Amino acid sequence: MEILLYSTVTCPECGYQKKEEMPTDACQFFYECENCKAVLKPKAGDCCIYCSYGTVPCPPVQKNTKCC
């Protein structure tokens, strides 16, 4: 199974999108939108901002392993 390392994050505040490389060894809990400077946090039940706002879930979720 191929693990995708890039996800496009969409800011829920302004709709700005940016393709980001996801870390493989840690969860990213906070993300600042480049456009509006809103600080994103994971939605309830999600482990990181990629699982909440990205087009691709984080690598541990893709592997069906425990996330941070």
Image (cartoon, rainbow, N blue to C red):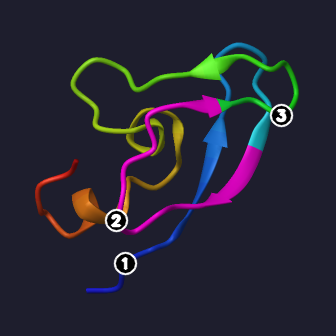
Determine the residue located farthest toward the bottom in the rendered image: 1
Q: Judging from the image, what secondary structure is the residue with disc 2 in?
A: helix
Mark 3, Cα crowd under 10 Å, few <14 / some 14-19 / many 20+, is few
For residue 46, the mark is none
* Residue 30 magenta: yes
Q: Does label 2 or label 3 sit earlier along the sequence?
A: 3
Q: Do the residues labelled 2 and 1 touch (CB within 8 Å)?
A: yes
**Disc 1 target residue:** 3
Determine the residue located farthest toward the front in the rendered image: 26
**Disc 3 target residue:** 34
Q: Does label 3 or label 1 sit earlier along the sequence?
A: 1
Q: Do the residues labelled 2 and 3 touch (CB within 8 Å)?
A: no
Give, as a three-letter code, the residue at label 1.
Ile
Question: What range is drawn magenta here?
Answer: 18-31
- Compared across the picture, whether 9 is left or right of 34 comes to left
Q: Judging from the image, what secondary structure is the residue with disc 3 in?
A: loop
Q: How far apart are marks 2 and 1 (CA)?
A: 6 Å
Give, as a three-letter code, the residue at label 2.
Pro
**Disc 2 target residue:** 59
Establish if 53 lies above or below 39: below
Which is closer to the viewer, label 3 or label 1?
Answer: 3
**Main structural element of the magenta stretch: helix, strand or loop?**
loop
- Compared across the picture, whether 28 is left or right of 20 comes to left
Quarter occupied by the N terminus: bottom left
Residue 5 x/y as whole percent: 50, 71
Residue located at (78% from left, 17% from top): 14
Q: Are marks 3 and 1 in contact (CB under 8 Å)?
A: no
Q: Distance between the residues labelled 2 and 3?
A: 23 Å
Q: Does label 2 or label 1 sit earlier along the sequence?
A: 1
